[in-house]
Image (cartoon, helix red, strand yellow):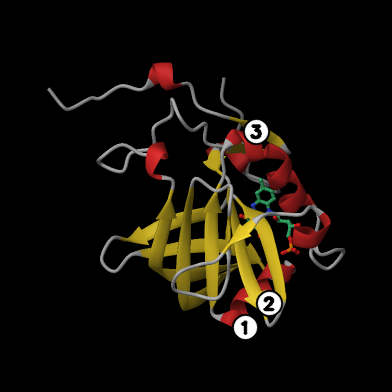
Amino acid sequence: MKKIVSDITQFQYFYPYTVAVVGARKGEELNYMSCAWHTALSFHPPLFGVLVAKKRRTHGFISQAREFTVNFLGRDDILLSARMGRISGYEQDKIKTFKVELEPAHSINTPVLASAYAAFECRLQDVRTYGDHDLFVGEVQTVQVNAQSFDAEGVLDTRQVKPLLYMGCDLYLTVDPETLEHKLPD
Ligand SMILES: Cc1cc2nc3c(=O)[nH]c(=O)nc-3n(C[C@H](O)[C@H](O)[C@H](O)COP(=O)(O)O)c2cc1C
């Protein structure tokens, strides 16, 4: 039996989503936040979008810096996701407090997370408001990937890496590589 909902206060029925930590720099300050609402938008040029609510500290950082990094986490980083996603940089410096290990980016001034299995270095191309979130669209300048985490075609090797997936409501899971199947149409 279907439940029909028209008074929509939340609609988290599309999860799971991979967790990305989005970071930006403002002068000497750095701010990172967990982001589940993200999407690729174009191959050529390579465009990637992240949806950030206006009230996030990261929002002001990206707007000012006009660049950001997108860092994809494995399951081992579940606590890092919870910290970056449940504490605001307005309350404390998350990078210093939690001693988050960073590595320099190649094309921009915002570091990537050392533990990310893949990270995008993006220059801001466009910003659009959609309700209570802004879509920041970045052109990916450089991608940093752990070579051993991907096969020759760039597909994530889920026997090596357990991607961290978010279900909403502080619930996380990962994938079962046993269910991987290559399928073409008949
Ligand atoms: C797993 C996870 C995913 C999240 N995804 C988003 C998102 O896509 N967009 C958003 O604006 N906030 C998202 N949040 C909330 C922010 O990460 C959270 O409010 C964070 O503390 C903001 O930090 P800041 O104020 O330092 O920018 C998410 C939180 C969690 C735990």
45 relative to 77, above or below: below
**Spatial separation of the CA atoms under disc 3 and disc 2:** 28 Å
Residue 183 quadrant: top left
At mark 2, the secondary structure is: helix
Which of 181 and 26 lies nearest the eye of the viewer? 26
Q: Are marks 1 and 2 in contact (CB under 8 Å)?
A: yes
Q: Residues within 10 Å of mark 1 (few under 14, many from 20)?
A: some
Q: CA distance from mark 1 to mark 3?
A: 32 Å
Residue 31's x, y, as percent? 70, 67
Choose the circle earlier in sequence order: 1 or 3. Answer: 1
Q: Residue at x 63, y 35 (%)?
A: 76
- Relative to 148, is 52 above or below? below
Quadrant in which ligand 1 is drawn: bottom right
Q: Position of residue 88 (x, y in %)?
A: 80, 61
The N terminus is located in which quarter?
Answer: top right
Mark 3 near ligand 1 (CB under 8 Å)? yes
Looking at this rendering, what residue extends furthest in the top direction?
178
Tag 3–tag 2 contact (CB < 8 Å):
no
Answer with left or right where residue 42 lies relative to residue 149.
left
| Residue at (43, 62) in percent of width and height | 48
Q: Earlier in the sequence, mark 3 or mark 2?
A: 2
Task: Give the SS element for disc 1.
Answer: helix
The label on residue 54 is: none
Tell me the amino acid under the disc marked 1: Gln
Ligand 1 contact, mark 2 (Cβ < 8 Å): no
Residue at position x 67%, y 62% in the image? 32
- Report the residue marked by disc 3: 172
* Total number of numbered discs in the rendering: 3
Identify the amino acid type marked 3: Tyr
Q: Which residue is mark 2?
A: 60
Q: Which residue is mark 1?
A: 64
